Image: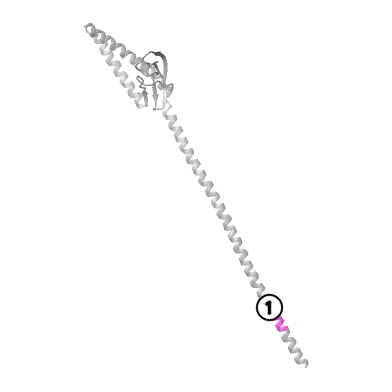
Amino acid sequence: MNSKRNKKEAEHQSAELKDKLQQATEAEEITKVDSSVTEETILEETNSELIQEAEKWKDIALRSQAEMENLRKRTQIDIEKANRYANIAFAKDLLPVADYLAGAIDCAQKEIEKSKEAGTECDVFLINLLKGVEMTQKQLHTVFAKHQIQKMETIGLVFDPNLHKVIQEIEDDTKEAGTIVQELQSGYTISGDRVLREAMVIVSK
């Protein structure tokens, strides 16, 4: 009888051990699953942070590249302007030379015209001098054109305070008020967008 009791107790203990072993195995599996889920979550969060960090530095790099490109363009424009207007002072100093040449040609032409009207023979020296001055003026205009120095057209245009300086106003009912009727001194621009010297003009009232 004692043998049967011992056998039952042994079977009972064995069953309990099996239950405990089963429970331990299940607990271990649950722990493995939880550990796997935790690692996956950590990896996803880490990847997300790395992606955000990469996007941030990419944006910084693109902004820096755009700023450098804008700086390069502004610097290029400044260099072009500096080169374009580097000779402004020298060009201004040449304008009176152009005035004197134009005055000399006008004076010589008037003297030659007077001789023709009087029926007298023109002075050969004066004629040759006129040719020489005209050639000099032509060469000067060639230099002006090379450096984009241009003489303003004024007669018949409406007065512009940015380009012209009014010396006198005269009555003229045939023209609109402010129309330039006479030029006393030529005006010049450089590169087409900067005034070297205003033109001195007479306008109609």
Q: Nearer the viewer, residue 200 or 159?
A: 159
Q: How is the image coloured?
A: one colour
Q: Nearer the viewer, residue 119 or 83?
A: 119
Image height check: is 56 above or below 76? Answer: below
101 in the magenta segment:
no
Image height check: is 55 above or below 151? Answer: below
Q: Position of residue 44 (x, y in %)?
A: 58, 60
Q: Nearer the viewer, residue 37 or 61?
A: 37
The residue that label 1 is drawn on is 21
Image height check: is 92 above or below 120? Answer: below
Q: Is residue 137 left or right of residue 77?
A: left
Q: Quadrant of residue 96?
A: top left
Magenta range is 13-19
Q: Residue furthest front?
A: 173
Q: Quadrant of residue 177?
A: top left
Q: Quadrant of residue 51?
A: bottom right
Q: Residue furthest bottom?
A: 1
Q: Which SS does the magenta portion mostly show?
A: helix
16 in the magenta segment:
yes
- Would you call the spot at circle 1 few (<14 residues within 10 Å), some (14-19), or many (20 or more)? few
Q: Amino acid at mark 1?
A: Leu
